Amino acid sequence: MPEFLPDPDITIENIRQAHGLIKPFTHRTPVLTSSWLDDRLRAELYFKCENFQKTGAFKARGAMHAVLRLSDEQAAKGVATHSSGNHAAALARAAHSRGVPAYIVMPENAPAVKVKAVESYHGKITFCKSTLQSREETLEKVVEETGAVFIPPYNHRDVILGQATCALEFLEDHPDLDIIMAPVGGGGLMSGTALSARFMKPTITVYGAEPEQANDAWQSLKAGRLVPSEKPDTIADGLRTSLGPITFDIISKNVDDILTVSEDQILKSMRDIWERMKIIIEPSCSVPLAAVETYPELFRGKKTGIILTGGNVDLDRLPWQ
Amino acid sequence: MPEFLPDPDITIENIRQAHGLIKPFTHRTPVLTSSWLDDRLRAELYFKCENFQKTGAFKARGAMHAVLRLSDEQAAKGVATHSSGNHAAALARAAHSRGVPAYIVMPENAPAVKVKAVESYHGKITFCKSTLQSREETLEKVVEETGAVFIPPYNHRDVILGQATCALEFLEDHPDLDIIMAPVGGGGLMSGTALSARFMKPTITVYGAEPEQANDAWQSLKAGRLVPSEKPDTIADGLRTSLGPITFDIISKNVDDILTVSEDQILKSMRDIWERMKIIIEPSCSVPLAAVETYPELFRGKKTGIILTGGNVDLDRLPWQ
């Protein structure tokens, strides 16, 4: 696999261009509020609903952008990735809308609902064992055989630029935010969010929110070097991945702090959003609200923008059951 | 209890005035779409999200309007109703925001979540047996003792005018709708929807959607007289009530047709909305989409507006479990 290195030359113009490219293929998602939450927390919270995004997650932005940035020659043989989550469906959809194949390596124990999503976007699935080694080896083989271009889920310039369009829209619609916050998994959304925020409003506070039990970003920022999660154990299944070199670099330069939260609070905040806001979100989405509940003094009286990342949950297996 | 008679003098101005009155106390709810549903049904569906309304249901509109229309003298002793559903919470909230008490008669077997909602808006609850007779007798006693004004859930001019503000907003935001559709329970929302639609766009087609197993509106329209449901048996718990004289009168004059749907289709459509649109809706909400699925030829190639009525479900007891 190629190494992806940070690009020091990302500008707001790159992000605006990314937005122009993906606009016809993505939703400008709405921003919702909850007076019940605001009253309880004495804060002003704005929720950008990427759970309403195409494919049910912000991942549609980055995957679409990465696919659209390929030359016709590069794209001709298709794209490939390994993923059991939202990036797989997003890449399959992006490739299909460009009329090229997507080769998706998925662990054999991937949830049926995720497999179905990839199939519904015409992704060509190769199953493998559920170890990272098997995933990487299988992907390498698929790439060799097909000549497809590997599009990684987060540690990739064009993916990050695509994810950055979410905060771009958010700050265009709500330029008066004091704080902007996203959850941190592999750091693609966090990197994009931080970049857009820094360009558009240098004075804004940028927080990442992370489960205590998958706190590699918090550890990495403290250590000043990449410290991958060893055994991430959180219901926020989208946040079990660890930062890569590019996302670590951007996050360490542009994020004010990483706030970590307990599993109990993640679950409680998830249920509050379902019950009070009447929207379906994944456990990963509730990690920023859990951070507001855990450190209320940071948010009191301030306008805080929170990105709700996705809504793909198995309705037959809700975490509070 | 007083009899409420139809008022032949309702005008669009009355509806606009109602809207002006309740605006500071209600959300202008967003309208969502789903390309997945549109592609499948070869239709263009617009969903007005009253599940995001204050109190989690459109009932906030009618109750607020009825309370605001009372003179200070009338309002002074408070308001009262019997309800185990969304009207109870809506009336409690409306009364509290006017600073007067709300006396709510609830059956002793009302779901804990509904009782909690009424309490959270400071409603004063009197429990009774779960029969209609016990509910009415208990309410009568409460009204006698307190001097409160009875605000019924739907068969009431000011309640209907309040509910009409939903279609008013819908048609202001989407004047190009060919069809507008709401579910029919007691007919308050249906009456208001039909009135706004007729005033604002006389050529629009107005449908009501009703469970086959609680089809009193369909029966009543066929018979030309009120035919209450005898044993309504539907998971769409908000639609088990029957029309009253006022709502029957308005609906028979202004609704093009009542479309009835099976329990299976209601459940399937509910799950489709949860899974694809990522929003939480009550079973009653999915009855109009179930009608589109059941009679697709009526909707093909047309722009159809559907009111999603509420999102108050017990997350521990989902109907597909």
Image (cartoon, coloured by chain):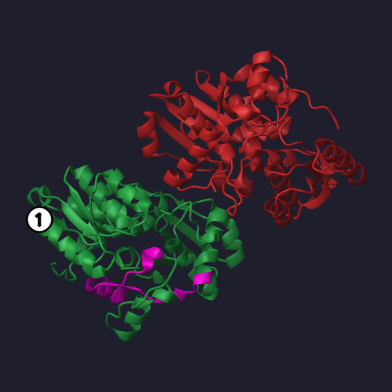
Chain colours: A red, B green
Residue B286 vertical placement versus A194 (above, below)? below
For the residue carrying disc 1, how many other residues have a C-alpha within 10 Å: few (<14), some (14-19), or many (20+)?
few
The answer to whether residue B223 is magenta is no
- Tell me: B100 left or right of B308: left
Can residue B193 be seen in the rendering of this structure? yes
Of all residues, the one furthest to the left in this rendering is: B73
Quadrant where the image shows the N terminus of chain B: bottom left
The answer to whether residue B254 is magenta is yes
Q: Position of residue A195 (x, y in %)?
A: 61, 25
Residue at position x 85%, y 36% in the image: A133
Can residue B13 be seen in the rendering of this structure? no
Residue A298 vertical placement versus A213 (above, below)? above
Residue that label 1 marks: B145
Residue at position x 60%, y 27% in the image: A212
Q: Position of residue B288 (x, y in %)?
A: 45, 67
Q: Position of residue B16 (x, y in %)?
A: 25, 55
Residue at position x 61%, y 43% in the image: A57
- Tell me: B31 left or right of A20: left
Quadrant where the image shows the C terminus of chain B: bottom right
* Three-letter amino acid code at the position of disc 1: Glu
What is the tally of numbered marks visible in this picture? 1
Q: Position of residue A301 (x, y in %)?
A: 38, 24
| Quadrant in which residue B159 is drawn | bottom left
Part of the protein shown in magenta: B237-264
Of all residues, the one furthest to the bottom in this rendering is: B223
Please report, as a chain letter, where disc 1 is located.
B
Q: Nearer the viewer, residue A84 or A4?
A: A84
Residue A315 vertical placement versus A65 (above, below)? below
- Numbered disc 1: secondary structure: helix
Q: Nearer the viewer, residue B60 or A287?
A: A287
- Tell me: A287 left or right of A246: left
| Quadrant in which residue A1 is drawn | top right
